[in-house]
Amino acid sequence: MLKYYLLLLFIIFFSDCKKEEDKIIYLDDVKSIKITDNISIDNGIKIHDPVFNYITYDKFLNHLSSSDRFLIVQQKDLEKTTSKDKIIISIRHDVDDNINSAVRFAYLEKKHGIKSTYFILHSAKYYGDTGVNYFKRDENIIYFMKKIQDSFGQEIGFHNDLVTLQVVYNLDSKKFLKNELEWLRSNDISILGSAYHGSEYCDIYHYVNAYFWTEYTTGGGAFYNFENVPKDGQLIHIEKDSYLNYNLEYESGLLKTDYFFADCFWPDGKRWNMGMVNFDTIQPGKKVVILLHPQHWD
């Protein structure tokens, strides 16, 4: 009999948890975000984690926007911005595998009057299909970027996975970059900056996508292959070029900051989140970059 009651309690508890997890919450009256006449994103959210969710991010944005201690700038404006009485914060988003979550983030930021930067990953499935000697772009991606840029006022950047294109997919990285930037700009997407992507292949073949840029003059130590990458019994010489040759103004990894926080860091075995830092205690005039991956918060 005791086993029966314990089993019943477990079923009830699990059922309640499941219902709570599946519950859809709307933070305001906007139930859907229109991308095109045929594409829309449900603006409802499900709480899968007590910290990494849209409610937490909404509260953080409210704190930033309601305080006079912070000056929020996009990545393109970080180096030229100075202040004697405000903490300068730049929020950067690396959109690795979920463009819908990026749109929802951009919507929340627009609501709070905050402008940030979204680095769109050209090797992600939402962007297109990438394979050995093959790339086919999903033309619909332009509408998602236009929504983030034009409707929500956010900056779009290029998330650089270019060394991966050469080493893993045998694609011409310079030609690819030239073609994609031309396509993006011809569709009125303003691309001024780049941020290198930490691909899973970087761990396998020990390179960093930043090494595509000649502005990086040294590697990250003996573990990394700065000039040549061993693969399948061959040495692949990394193609390199200056970002200035592509009318780019900055590489995010080279921007000078005083503090850099990211939700891909794991201090003390826990994924970093904004609740781990009291931003109000940072000295005015300091520059802070907060790197978030929207998919972690979905």
Image (cartoon, rainbow, N blue to C red):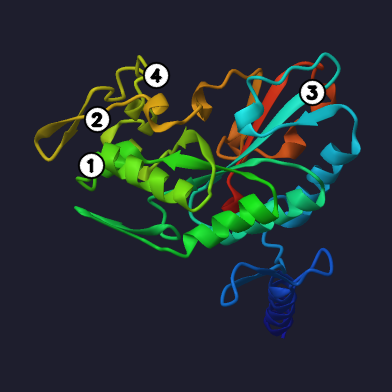
In the image: residue 133, left or right of residue 64: left
Foreground mark, 2 or 3, reads 2
**Sequence order check: which comes first, mark 4 or mark 2?**
4
The residue under label 3 is: 87
Secondary element at tag 1: loop
> Are the two marked residues, 1 and 2, in contact with CB atoms closer than 8 angstroms?
yes
Residue 72: assigned label:
none
Amino acid type, mark 4: Glu
Give the Cα distance between marks 3 and 4. 28 Å
Q: Mark 2 = which residue?
A: 239
Q: Quadrant of residue 144?
A: bottom right
| Disc 2 + disc 3, Cβ < 8 Å | no
Above or below, 121 against 88 in this view is below
- Mark 3, Cα crowd under 10 Å, few <14 / some 14-19 / many 20+, is many
C-alpha span from label 2 to label 3: 38 Å
According to the picture, the residue beneath numbered tag 1 turns out to be 172
Relative to residue 189, is residue 14 depicted above or below?
below
Disc 2 is placed on an element classified as: loop
216 in relation to 145, above or below: above
Q: Looking at the rendering, in which quadrant would you find the C terminus?
A: bottom right
Compared to residue 57, the image places residue 228 above or below, namely above
Disc 3, disc 4: CB below 8 Å?
A: no
Q: Which residue is mark 4?
A: 215
Kindly report which numbered mark, 3 or 1, lies closer to the viewer in this rendering: 1
Q: Is residue 261 left or right of residue 26?
A: left
- Determine whether, in the image, residue 18 is placed left or right of residue 248: right
Q: Amino acid at mark 1?
A: Asp
Q: Where in the figure is residue 154, as x and y percent of width and height? A: 66, 45
